[in-house]
C-alpha cells in the first residue's frame, strides 16, 4: 500500500534518520531539486549510507535521481542501485526513450552486481508538457515502471502559467496522467500540494486527486502526510460495504445463483474487484496499527 | 511607621544591616527581563560589601554581571535551582570560590524554612506594591503574574526589601505577599523589560518529530489508567510538551473528562484548557506568558501558589503530591532512567532541576519526552553525566522511535503494550540511537568540583566537575 510519498532532502541527515517515523507509506530520498549542485556528491553518499544503515521498516524507499540532462544521473544510479532501493524516480521523463535509456543502464548495473533482473522498479516523474502528452508511452516503456508521478511545479513552468491553490492549470495533466497510467496497468500519483501552512487546502486537494482516480499523492511536508493517508484510506463505510459485497457473493454461490444484487444494485466484476482492494487495504491498515485500539 | 518607603536602594541596603558573609536572595519571576538582581548587586559592589552568598531561585543570561561580582569576591557562593547556559559556562570553568549549590523548586523553600539556607536579606522584585509593602505580580507595567518563588523568601528572611516600579497608595487590596513580612519599599524606574519577562505567546511545535512524540505522550496518558474525572496534569513550556497538552485536550473534550487541576509553570495553553472545562482550577507558581498573566489576574479559578505549596517535601503536603501526570524534558537519560537536565554534552552547566525532580517524585506518572538524538549525540546513555532526577522517579521515556517504560512500573508497561503502543526496552532505544550516531566518547571529569546537585530532601545527588573551555 502506497498512499503517501514524502520527499526528503538527500543532504539533511537529521531529517533522513527520522524518515520512517513520519507516517508516510514511502519516502523519496531526493538527490535532485532539494540538493544544490555543490552538494550532489555529499547527498549521494549520505543517501547511500542511510539506505545501508537505516532499516526503513515503516516506509518504502524511493530515490529521486538527477535528470538525464545533468551530469549526475549515472553516478546516482552507480551509487544507489547496489543497495536495491524499492523504486528509482527519474525526473523530467518526456518520452519512452528516456525511460528505456535509464532501464538499460540499471539492467547493466543489475547484471554486473548479480542483482536479480528487473528487481529495481521505476516511477517516472512527468513534469513537462511533452511528458504529459506521452504519458501512456512512458508508462509502457519498461517492465520496471510501476507508477507515474505528476510534477506540477516544473510542469506549470513549462506550460508558462502560474501554479495556483485551485490547480485548474494542471487539471488536464492530472486527468491525462491517471488515464494513461490506468491504461498501462500501473499506479498514478498526484503532485505535492505546496503550501505547508494550508491545513484545509491539503485536504481539499487530496480529495480532488482521489476523485480523479489517483492511487496516492506525493508530499513535500511531513505535515501533509496525515491528510493524504486519511483521504486515501478506505472509510469505515467503504470497508463495511466491501465485506457486504463479499458476503453477498458467498451466499449467492451457496444458493447457486449467477446474478447477484446488493442494496438494489447489480454486483458486477469491477465492484467485486474494488471490494477486494478495499478489504486488502483495510487489513493492511489494521496490521500497520498493530491491532491497537486508538 | 507611616510607611516603609525608602528613597534609594542604597539606603534600603544600609537599613537592612547587610554585611560581609551574609546571604541575600532573589526570585526569578522577571526571568530574562529582570533588572533587580543586577541593580542590587551593582549597589552592593559600590558599597564594597564582599563575601556574600546569593540565593536565587533561578539565574538567566541577563544576570551575567554576577560573574564579575564573583571575580571581585563580592559574591563567593551561589545557591540556585537553575542557571542558563551563559552563566553555567563560567561556573563550569571554576569562577566561583565555593561550590554552587543546586536545589529544586521544592527543596529550596524547604531548606530556607528549616534554616539550612537562612536568608539575611530578601530582595523582592514586585510589579506593583503599596507604600507598606503589600505587593503582587498581577498588575503594573512589569506584570509577571504569580510570585510563587518569592513567598518563602519574604516569609523567612530576616529583612525583606520590596523593589517596585509601580507604587500605589495603601492598601493594595489584591496582594500576593502581605505587608506583614516587608521591612522596606523602594520605588525605581523599572524592575524589568516586559519583553524578557513573558513571551508574547508560547507556541506549539510544528516540527513533525516533536508532534510524533507529543502524540505518543498523549496516548501514553490515555492508556495509563489515570485519564479520568479528577485528572491532574503539569507540562512545560517547550513546543513538544505544549503539543502533548493539545492532543490531551482533544482527548479530554472528546471523552468529556473533567480534570481537577493543571499545575505549573502555567502557559496560555493551560489557560485554554481551563476555559474549555478540562480542569476545575489552575495552581500557578509561575506564569510563562501574557495569557497566563491575564488569567491569574482575572479568573478566580486560576490560583497563585507559593513554592512551598507547590513542591516542598517538608510541607505537610504539597500540590505535587496530588499530581497525576507530569511531562518533562531531558538532555540525557540513562538505562536506569536517571535524568540529566543540568549539563550539556560537553559537561558545561546549562540548566538545573527547577521543579523537575519535585514533580517526578510527586506525580503518579512521570514522563520524559526527548528525541533519540540531538546534535549527532544519542540521548540515551549508559550513565548520565549528572543525575538531576533519580531513575526511581521516572516512569516512561517517549521518543520518536519508541516508548521505554521503567521496569519498576510493570503495570504501566503491560497497559501500554496491550493498547498497541510501541513499547521497547530502553537498552534497545540506546542501541538504535547509537546505530545512527555512533558511540560518543565518555567525557573526562574536570579537575575540581564546581557544583553540588542536592535532591529535594537535602541529600547529595551528584557533583558537577569543571570543564576546560573548548572554545
Image: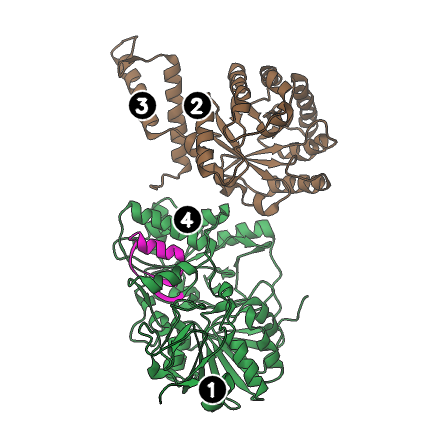
Subunit of label 2: A
Q: Position of residue B257 (x, y in %)?
A: 27, 51
Q: Position of residue B335 (x, y in %)?
A: 48, 59
Q: Is residue A167 visible?
A: yes
What's the distance in space between the residues labelled 2 and 4, CA to CA? 32 Å
Q: Which SS class for mark 4?
A: helix
Q: Is residue A123 left or right of residue B426?
A: right
Query: Which of A211/B315 is in front?
Result: A211
Residue pictured at 40% horizontal, 87% vertical: B158
Residue pictured at 65% horizontal, 36% vertical: A31
Q: Position of residue A211 (x, y in %)?
A: 43, 23
Q: Which mark is residue B12?
A: 1
- Pointer 3 local density, CA inside 10 Å: few below 14, some 14–19, many at least 20: some
Q: Nearer the viewer, mark 1 or mark 3?
A: 1
Q: What hue represents chain B?
A: green
- Pointer 2 local density, CA inside 10 Å: few below 14, some 14–19, many at least 20: few
Question: In the rendered image, which residue does mark 2 sit on?
Answer: A211
Q: From the viewer's perspective, is residue A157 above or below residue B394?
A: above
Question: In the rendered image, which residue does mark 4 sit on?
Answer: B216
**Residue farthest front in this picture:** B169
Q: Position of residue B233 (x, y in %)?
A: 34, 59
Q: From the viewer's perspective, is residue A18 above or below residue A177?
A: below
Q: Nearer the viewer, mark 2 or mark 4?
A: 2
Q: From the viewer's perspective, is residue A161 above or below residue B316?
A: above
Q: Which mark is residue A241?
A: 3
Q: Earlier in the sequence, mark 3 or mark 2?
A: 2
Subunit of label 3: A
Chain identifier of the brown chain: A
What's the distance in space between the residues labelled 3 and 2, CA to CA? 18 Å
Amino acid at each position: 500500500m502506497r498512499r503517501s510519498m514524502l520527499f526528503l532532502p538527500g543532504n539533511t541527515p537529521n531529517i533522513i534518520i527520522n524518515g520512517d517515523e513520519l507516517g508516510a507509506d514511502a519516502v523519496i530520498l531526493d538527490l535532485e531539486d532539494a540538493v544544490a549542485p555543490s552538494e550532489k556528491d555529499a547527498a549521494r553518499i549520505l543517501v547511500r549510507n542511510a539506505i545501508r544503515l537505516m532499516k526503513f521498516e515503516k516506509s518504502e524507499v524511493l530515490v529521486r535521481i538527477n535528470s538525464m540532462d545533468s551530469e549526475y544521473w549515472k553516478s546516482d544510479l552507480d551509487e544507489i542501485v547496489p543497495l536495491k532501493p524499492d523504486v528509482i524516480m527519474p525526473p523530467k521523463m518526456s518520452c519512452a526513450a528516456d525511460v528505456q535509456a535509464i532501464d538499460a543502464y540499471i539492467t547493466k548495473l543489475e547484471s554486473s552486481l548479480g542483482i536479480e533482473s528487473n528487481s529495481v522498479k521505476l516511477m517516472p516523474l512527468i513534469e513537462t508538457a511533452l511528458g504529459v502528452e506521452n504519458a501512456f508511452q512512458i508508462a509502457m516503456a519498461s517492465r520496471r515502471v510501476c507508477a507515474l508521478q505528476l510534477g506540477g511545479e516544473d510542469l506549470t513552468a513549462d506550460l508558462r502559467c502560474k501554479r495556483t491553490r485551485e490547480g485548474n492549470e494542471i487539471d488536464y495533466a492530472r486527468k491525462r496522467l491517471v488515464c494513461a497510467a490506468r491504461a498501462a496497468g500501473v499506479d498514478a500519483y498526484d503532485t505535492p500540494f505546496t503550501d505547508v501552512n494550508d491545513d484545509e487546502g491539503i485536504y481539499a486537494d487530496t480529495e480532488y486527486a482521489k476523485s480523479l482516480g489517483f492511487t496516492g499523492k506525493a508530499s513535500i511536508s511531513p505535515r501533509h502526510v496525515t491528510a493524504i493517508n486519511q483521504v486515501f484510506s478506505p472509510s469505515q463505510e467503504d470497508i463495511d460495504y466491501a465485506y457486504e459485497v463479499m458476503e453477498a457473493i458467498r451466499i449467492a454461490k451457496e444458493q447457486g445463483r449467477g446474478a447477484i444484487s446488493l442494496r438494489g444494485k447489480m454486483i458486477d466484476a469491477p465492484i467485486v474487484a474494488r471490494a477486494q482492494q478495499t478489504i486488502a487495504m483495510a487489513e493492511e491498515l489494521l496490521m500497520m496499527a498493530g491491532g491497537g485500539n486508538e | 511607621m507611616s510607611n516603609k518607603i525608602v528613597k534609594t536602594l542604597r539606603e534600603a541596603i544600609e537599613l537592612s544591616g547587610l554585611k560581609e558573609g551574609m546571604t541575600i536572595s532573589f526570585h526569578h519571576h522577571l526571568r530574562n527581563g529582570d533588572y533587580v538582581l543586577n541593580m542590587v548587586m551593582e549597589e552592593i559592589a559600590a558599597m564594597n560589601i564582599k563575601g556574600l552568598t546569593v540565593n536565587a531561585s533561578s539565574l538567566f543570561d541577563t544576570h551575567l554581571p554576577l560573574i564579575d561580582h564573583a571575580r571581585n569576591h563580592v559574591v563567593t557562593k551561589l545557591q540556585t535551582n537553575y542557571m542558563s547556559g551563559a552563566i553555567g559556562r563560567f561556573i563550569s570553568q571554576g569562577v566561583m570560590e565555593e561550590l554552587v549549590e543546586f536545589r529544586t523548586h521544592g527543596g529550596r523553600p524547604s531548606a530556607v524554612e528549616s534554616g539550612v539556607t537562612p536568608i539575611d536579606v530578601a530582595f523582592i522584585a514586585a510589579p506593583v506594591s503599596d507604600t507598606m509593602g503589600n505587593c503582587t505580580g498581577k498588575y503594573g507595567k512589569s506584570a509577571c503574574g504569580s510570585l510563587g518563588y518569592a513567598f518563602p523568601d519574604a516569609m523567612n528572611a530576616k529583612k525583606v526589601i520590596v523593589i517596585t516600579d509601580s507604587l500605589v497608595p495603601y492598601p493594595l487590596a489584591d496582594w500576593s505577599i502581605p505587608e506583614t513580612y516587608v521591612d522596606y519599599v523602594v520605588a525605581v524606574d523599572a524592575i524589568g523589560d516586559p519583553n524578557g519577562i513573558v513571551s508574547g505567546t508560547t507556541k506549539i511545535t510544528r516540527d513533525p518529530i516533536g508532534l510524533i512524540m507529543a502524540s505518543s505522550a498523549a496516548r501514553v496518558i490515555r492508556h495509563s489508567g489515570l485519564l479520568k474525572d479528577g485528572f491532574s496534569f503539569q507540562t512545560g513550556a517547550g513546543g513538544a510538551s505544549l503539543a502533548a497538552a493539545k492532543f490531551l485536550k482533544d482527548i479530554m473534550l472528546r471523552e468529556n473528562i473533567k480534570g481537577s487541576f493543571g499545575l505549573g509553570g502555567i502557559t496560555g495553553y493551560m489557560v485554554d484548557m481551563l476555559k474549555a472545562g478540562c480542569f476545575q482550577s489552575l495552581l500557578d507558581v509561575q506564569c510563562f506568558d501574557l495569557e497566563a498573566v491575564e488569567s491569574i489576574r482575572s479568573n478566580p479559578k486560576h490560583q497563585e501558589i507559593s513554592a512551598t505549596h507547590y513542591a516542598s517535601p517538608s510541607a505537610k503536603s504539597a500540590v505535587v503530591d496530588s499530581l497525576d501526570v507530569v511531562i518533562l524534558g531531558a538532555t540525557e537519560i540513562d538505562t536506569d532512567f536517571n535524568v540529566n537536565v543540568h549539563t550539556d554534552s560537553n559537561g558545561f552547566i546549562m540548566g538545573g532541576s527547577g521543579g523537575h525532580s519535585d514533580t517526578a517524585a510527586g506525580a503518579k506518572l512521570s514522563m520524559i519526552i526527548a528525541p533519540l538524538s540531538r546534535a549527532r549525540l544519542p540521548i540515551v546513555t549508559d550513565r548520565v553525566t549528572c543525575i538531576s532526577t533519580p531513575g526511581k522517579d521516572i516512569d516512561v521515556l517517549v521518543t520518536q522511535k519508541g516508548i521505554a517504560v521503567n521496569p519498576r512500573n510493570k503495570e504501566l508497561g503491560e497497559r501500554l503494550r496491550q493498547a498497541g503502543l510501541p513499547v521497547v526496552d530502553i537498552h534497545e532505544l540506546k542501541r538504535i540511537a547509537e546505530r545512527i550516531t555512533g558511540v560518543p566518547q565518555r567525557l573526562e571529569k574536570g579537575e575540581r568540583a564546581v557544583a553540588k546537585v542536592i535532591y529535594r530532601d537535602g541529600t547529595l545527588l551528584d557533583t558537577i566537575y569543571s570543564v576546560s573551555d573548548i572554545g
